[in-house]
Amino acid sequence: MANSNQTGSVLAFHETEFDVVDIHNVPWLRVNQIGLALSYKNPDLSVSKLFRENADEFTEEMTRLVELDTAGGRQQVRIFSPRGCYLIGMLARTERAKEFRKWVLDVLEGRQVPREMMGRGVVSINQQIAAHPRRLALLKELHKTTDPALRRAIHEQLDHASRLLGLSTPALADIGQDARPDCESPVLEEFWDIFDTLQNLSGGKLNHARGSGLISFNLPQMRAAAAAAKLKLPDLSELRHLLKACRSPRFIDIKTVNSRISQESVKCWVFEPLDADGQEG
């Protein structure tokens, strides 16, 4: 029998959450929780029976009794190492046994993260255990946060946690949304001031929209016009982000339009101005 450290970390297999027991940096699982993962009606009794009937196949490196805090107080609990868990999965005859064995190899024993994702080295099981709840917390935080700069920072942290687990990172645009700024944003105010200036300098040749109801400009053309006029546009990555959220004028789409200027198809950012009462024109 031995004393052991409880990590407070949690791993999950379907609806079963395991309270991991750390012994020399190796995760061991409790008998009753293994039984739950294998869908036994009497999880503790069923797994304990499997062990007793096949005790000669288990070594001290696969299972042992340790003192742990439980709902009934501190008492001896049988735990199993990854190798022990795998053997229990081999002996079990439930529908989930095969999937559980794969989970033991893929998750519990740890896995090497691809070099193109981590550069080099192996991620320890403790790092993976910590990364799972961290990744979920970041996803929830990102879904609630609307500040654009903060969302980008959280997304970078999410990407790091996902890499530790060998998982893909959802695109920022797929998780929640930025606050929709109006054109009181200093960056947008500066942009539209430059647009008006260039429109005047070019004799109205930046707006490709037919009629007076829309604003349609080609961003590369506007960049070239700004450079020729020695005007500096705001940072383009931030500008694109803000323009898509702009409400005054209201952003509609990025699409190909038939230019009133060149009579050709031109890819444009399309906006609809608001009238003096704040209504769409």
Image (cartoon, rainbow, N blue to C red):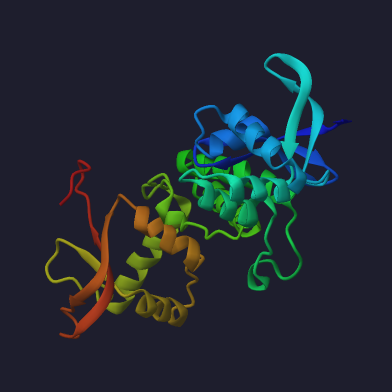
Q: Nearer the viewer, residue 83 or 173?
A: 83
Q: Position of residue 194 (x, y in %)?
A: 40, 66
Quick check: 162 left or right of 254?
right
What residue appears at the point 64 percent right and 33 percent down from the top-left corner?
Answer: 49
Q: Position of residue 141 (x, y in %)?
A: 53, 40
Q: Quadrant of the N terminus?
A: top right
Residue extending furthest toward the right: 2
What residue appears at the point 59 percent right and 57 percent down from the top-left corner?
Answer: 159
Residue 158 appears anywhere in the view: no
**Does 207 appear above or below 65?**
below
Q: Nearer the viewer, residue 20 or 122?
A: 20
Residue extending furthest toward the left: 211
Q: Nearer the viewer, residue 29 or 122?
A: 29
Quick check: 182 left or right of 262?
right
Residue 36 appears anywhere in the view: yes
Quick check: 220 left or right of 159?
left
Q: Position of residue 83 (x, y in %)?
A: 72, 51
Residue extending furthest toward the top: 72
What residue appears at the point 66 percent right and 57 percent down from the top-left corner?
Answer: 164
Quick check: 221 left or right of 62?
left
**Does 59 appear above or below 200?**
above
Q: Nearer the viewer, residue 127 or 220?
A: 127
Q: Position of residue 154 (x, y in %)?
A: 58, 49
